[in-house]
Image (tube, rainbow, N blue to C red):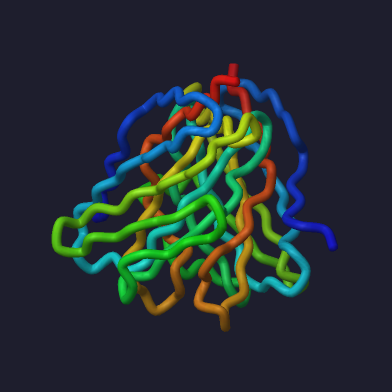
């Protein structure tokens, strides 16, 4: 049973460009959340998607947007990249009826902005 | 919003000894407190969690305690082994209509087990 899968694993982009990261949730999960983890820091909540809608959002600018597809997979888009956007981007999935407890993280996408 | 502080930032213990990591939170409404272990190149892995209706939970060598009055919770690892070496994160979240995914994490503790 595959867990949460993210692609790509690594990415290098130039300042000002746009990037799309992808996530497939664990089988049986219907909710996807995205986190940003800067080097040496704890993950920070970006947003959560359920039933193809953004349900909760953290303190991130509108440059960060997302999408959830009918098969529950999700994308994170970041526009107008800044050097400070360099981080590990983590996707986590959960089952809504379970209350979101104990959700599962993927291994992340390492984004470097140069 | 919620703010979580975690101490210590680094911890070294002899193999077989116990390790304790402590966290405090600011939002008295928070009711879910998971602990994650993150190994190099991997995403965080849930190792134990506790809800605010209990004061302690144990799973083999790992235990978590919660003091709601003082707003702090701790991770205890007994009989430490080399494979326990990793970065550990605590987290907290208040209830919401959309579940418990909006976690606020601490800054992490790098635990090193000395053989």
Q: Is residue B87 left or right of residue B57?
A: right
Q: Is residue A56 left or right of residue A13?
A: left
Q: Is residue A112 above or below residue B76?
A: above
Which residue, as the protein is rendered here, is positioned at the far right? A1
- Looking at the picture, how far across and down is residue B19, in whole percent? 42, 37
- Looking at the picture, how far across and down is residue B76, in whole percent? 41, 47
Q: Quadrant of residue A93?
A: bottom right
Q: Is residue B17 above or below residue A103?
A: above
Q: Residue at x 31, y 34 (%)?
A: B7
Nearer the observer, A9 or A79: A9
Q: Is residue B57 above or below residue A108?
A: below
Q: Quadrant of residue A16?
A: top right
- Looking at the picture, how far across and down is residue B110, in whole percent? 47, 28
Nearer the observer, B70 or B92: B70
Which residue, as the protein is rendered here, is positioned at the far left? B69
Q: Residue at x 48, y 39 (%)?
A: B88
- Looking at the picture, how far across and down is residue B47, in whole percent? 56, 53
Q: Is residue A20 above or below residue A93?
A: above
Q: Residue at x 33, y 30 (%)?
A: B8
């Amino acid at each position: 049973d595959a867990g949460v899968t993210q692609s790509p694993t690594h990415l290098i982009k130039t300042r000002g460009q746009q990037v799309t990261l992808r996530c497939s949730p664990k089988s049986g999960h219907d909710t996807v959340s995205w986190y940003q983890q800067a080097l040496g820091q704890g993950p920070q909540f970006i947003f959560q998607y359920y039933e193809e809608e953004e349900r909760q959002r953290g303190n991130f600018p509108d440059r960060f947007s997302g999408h959830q597809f009918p098969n529950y997979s999700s994308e994170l888009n970041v526009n107008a990249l800044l050097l400070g956007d360099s981080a590990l981007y983590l996707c986590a999935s959960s089952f809504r009826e379970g209350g979101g407890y104990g959700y599962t993280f993927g291994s992340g996408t390492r984004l470097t902005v140069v | 919003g919620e703010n979580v502080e975690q101490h210590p930032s680094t911890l070294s213990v002899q193999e077989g000894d116990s390790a304790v990591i402590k966290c405090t939170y600011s939002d008295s409404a928070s009711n879910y407190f998971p602990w994650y272990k993150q190994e190099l190149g991997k995403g965080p892995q849930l190792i134990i969690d506790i809800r605010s209706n209990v004061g302690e939970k144990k799973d083999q060598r790992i235990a978590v305690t919660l003091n709601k009055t003082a707003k702090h919770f701790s991770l205890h690892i007994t009989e430490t082994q080399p494979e326990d070496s990793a970065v550990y994160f605590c987290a907290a979240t208040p209830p919401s209509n959309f579940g418990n995914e909006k976690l606020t994490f601490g800054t992490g503790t790098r635990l090193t087990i000395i053989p």
